[in-house]
Image: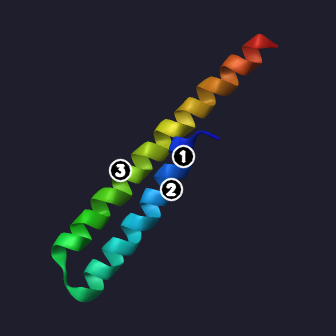
Amino acid sequence: MDKDRTTGVGHQVKGAIKEGVGKITGNDQLETEGKAERVGGKVQEGVGKGKDTLRDAADSLKK
């Protein structure tokens, strides 16, 4: 598993927490930062999935 996948999931969790705290406290800036971090984490996870797919395809061609 590519490290981008795990790092991306971590950013999604961190962003969701920030977003939730921002909503509860009425802090629009924190909520917006959380949303942005969550979306960035999804993108990073997608990049990691793509790398895994390419690595798996290359491995199957070697066999």
Tag 3 residue: 40
Q: Position of residue 4 (x, y in %)?
A: 51, 42
Please, what is the three-letter code of the amino acid marked with disc 1? Arg
- The x, y position of residue 42, in whole percent, is 43, 50
At 37% from the left and 65% from the top, the residue drawn is: 15
Describe residue 23's horizontal placement relative to residue 41 as left or right: left
Q: Residue at x 73, y 13 (%)?
A: 61
**Residue on which the image places disc 1:** 5
Q: Position of residue 52 (x, y in %)?
A: 61, 33
In the rendered picture of this protein, how many numbered marks are placed on residues? 3
Compared with residue 57, is residue 35 higher up or lower down, i.e. above or below? below
Q: CA distance from mark 1 to mark 3?
A: 12 Å
Question: Pointer 2 and pointer 3: residues touching (CB < 8 Å)?
Answer: no
Q: Quadrant of residue 58?
A: top right
Label 2 crowd (10 A; few <14 / some 14-19 / many >=20): many
Label 3: state its secondary structure. helix
Crowd tier of the residue under label 3, counting other residues whose Cα lies within 10 Å: few below 14, some 14–19, many 20 or above: some
Amino acid residing under circle 2: Val
Labels 1 and 3: the sequence-earlier one = 1
Q: Disc 2 or 3, which lies upstream in sequence?
A: 2
Which quarter of the figure has residue 11?
bottom left
Quarter location, residue 24 = bottom left
